[in-house]
Amino acid sequence: MSAISELTSLRRSRAKTADERRQQRKENSRDNKAGYLFLLPWLIGLVVITIGPMCASLYLSFTDYNLLQPPKWAGLANFQQMLHDQRLHQSLKVTFIYVFVGVPLQLALALAIAILLDKGMKGLSFYRSIFYLPSMLGGSVAIAVLWRQIFGTDGLVNQVLRLIGIDSHTGWVSDPRYALGTIIILHIWTFGSPMVIFLAGLRQIPVMYYEAAAVDGASRWSRFSRITMPLLSPIVFFNLVLQIIGAFQSFTQAFVVSGGSGGPSDSTLFYTLYLYNRGFANLQMGYASAMAWLLLVIIGGFTAINFFVSKYWVFYDD
Amino acid sequence: MSFSRRQFLAGATVAASASTLGLTACSGKSASSGDSATLSFGWWGNDVRNKETDQAIKAYTKANPKVTVKPQPGEWDSYWDKLSTEVAGKNAPDVIQMDMAYISQYAKNGTLLDLSQYGVDTSKFAPGTVDAGKIDGKLVGVNAGINSLTMMANPELFEKAGVELPDDTKWTWDDYLNISAELQAKGPAGTTGNQCAFPTDNLLQIWLRQNGKDLYTADGLAFDAGDLTTYLNLMVKFMNADAMPTASAINEEIGKSMDQSAFGTGKQGFALYWSNQLAAINEASGKSMKMLRPPTVAGDATQRNAWYKASMLWSGYAGTKNPEAVGKLINWWVNNPEAANICLDERGVPANTEMVKTIEPKLTDAGKATVKYLDDIKPELGDTPPAPPAGSSEIGDIMQRHTNDILFGKDKPETAAPKIISELQAAIKNAQ
């Protein structure tokens, strides 16, 4: 309890005259005013940058809006159109594959590396930085451009394959069979931020549990599955929720790798990329807004499921 | 009662936010009086164009010291995303470099000035070059240069492969196929015959016009699924004959700049370009490419129904504060020898015939070749195609997607053609 509130409750405990109560209200409202003033920068940001555009987008999702003319009310037409939009369904398929393959693999890799690094080896901070590096770069345009070169028909990957005797002429980013897989690998490669969080979580597990288990003759696997995993589960959950939300909103890699088209043959048509194309290339801002709201509902749905299921596997040690 | 820390901080916050508000209020004001004007000037381009445009802007502001011009150069792909957003935000550039593919859309929505009312003189323009920019009787775009499609060839590669250049007044699509396949087989490792221009609306339009059709009428499509099926089958023929790159190599080319493209690096025999791009492709490749007429169905170039296109147009933003200044600048750009001498033919051969005479001695070999090409093909010209209807700019995207399905073996021309047609019709309908 802070000193101020302690003082306040102390005053409250006495019987109060009307005068004192007025004084009290004045103080309270002054307190609140100061609080709101401090909040102001954030509040302005929230209203102007987040809530304002969200309300506008909700309104636009019920309109036919081409940016050049004022929006026309269209009711539920955009949402009805979404039911029959083959490309929308394709973009959902691509995005779901990306999320449900990319996120678990990325988290598994992050956890594995974190456990390796947790051995307290020499130069830990160096390795940690090295492994974290791709996360800082991975979302950038430069790396996506580089990726495009590395996985091109005459790129590094094929050259290495040829060196070891495989005559590969596959365009890993330009063939619809492999393009999405290549982007998923790029995503997995950026395992740094969940890794750092895992590492912090591992450090929190008291060593005495492991010592006790070792004395009882527990194998490595049972130490991992019965001590590490349960105690780390809140961290796993946190990473899972965050990464799923992030993965649903992926845009840059697909945009750069496919040259903005989601191609070849819509094989990398991410949901956000299709949304962007609808809005800015085809000038159907109303439809794009409706798509944005569907994405919000999908992400919200998955996050809710995540929290619901977490009751059965996340262990809180308190 | 003393002045508490909390009160002090609260006061400081108020003061800080008040001063911030004050600052924004100040910057909101802008001066505009008399002849003085600040104009923003948006264009897409390449290195050569950016340099020349900057130079011309400097020359203009030197002659008109009260005018300030803010250059906004861009790249083709992002230019249109940016422009539509700026129009929605009512802060589009005052002078807009426009393209035939988009002009209907912007004009229809009242975004563009009628430049004939603001002193832009087109009386010296060559016949047929003004109308392209007229929509519903208003001059919403001023021809910034004429060009025509040409099949560029890399003579150096032909020599290396020991293949002869075709006679472009007589060659047919079969010749195009055979020569491409021969080049690809005989050229140095990694050589491809042509860039596969089939997914572009340009090659489609060339082919359609040779067959007595066209891409668009004033408000819809001028071809049907049958035509498109035949055309797409031609592409399949090229693929099966190994006359063009593999499907994935074609896709890797997308988004590459000229100097990185297969043609620009000297690994490709033919590539379809606009005639005004010769100087740029020569600079990017360091070679001197040869301009050929596209192949014909009849094997006779005079029957190919060729056309001149406004390579780009100058438009004014209807929301500008200084329409007079916009008109004056555009008029200077297309009618003043000083401007013509700086920009020469980079945006295409000037529509003003006097300007062509002015600049001709100064042109590079590439420039002279372009003027000659446009002059040579005069007997082959047919009717000028109407401005593409609003929404039709999606054709590139739609064609690319479905031709990819065919190239990767996921679809057939017979089934892809009706899909392309219906998606295009929907796009045009959506934009009306």
Image (cartoon, coloured by chain):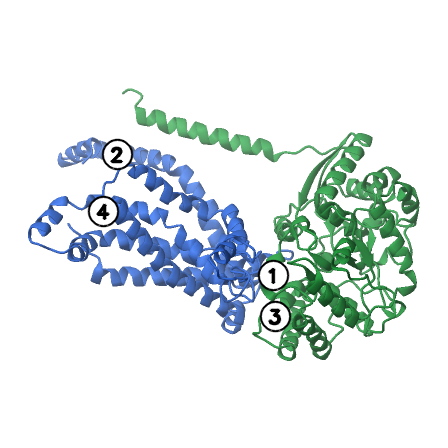
Residue at which label 3 appears:
B407
The circle drawn on residue A202 is 4
Colour given to chain B in the rendered image: green
- Give whichever of B52, A49 is nearer the camera: B52
Residue at the disc numbered 2: A22
The answer to whether marks 1 and 4 sit on the same chain is no
Q: Which chain is blue?
A: A
Few, some or many residues within 10 Å of mark 2 (<14, 14–19, 20+): few
Q: Secondary structure at mark 2?
A: helix
Number of residues whose C-alpha sits closer than 10 Å to that of mark 3, classed few (under 14), some (14–19) or many (20 or more): some
How packed mark 1 is, by other alpha carbons closer than 10 Å (few <14, some 14-19, many 20 or more), is many
Residue at x-position 27% and y-position 45%: A117
Give the percent coordinates (x, y) of residue B34.
78, 33
* x 62%, y 54%: residue: B255
SS at mark 1 in the image: helix
**Residue type, numbered disc 4:** Leu
Q: Where's residue B334, x and y in %? A: 84, 45
Marks 2/4: CA distance?
Answer: 54 Å
Amino acid type of the residue that numbered disc 3 sits on in the rendered structure? Leu
Q: Considering only vertical position in the picture, is A29 above or below B102?
A: above
Q: Which mark is residue B52?
A: none
Could you tell me which chain the residue with mark 3 belongs to?
B
Q: CA distance from mark 4 to mark 3?
A: 51 Å
Residue where numbered disc 1 is placed: B249
**Which of disc 1 and disc 3 is earlier in sequence?**
1
Instruction: Tell me the mark number nearer the camera, choosing from 4 and 3.
Output: 3
Task: Give coordinates of residue A67: x percent, y percent.
Answer: 61, 56
Q: CA distance from mark 1 to mark 4?
A: 46 Å
Position in image of residue B91 (x %, y %): 64, 45
Protein chain holding label 1: B
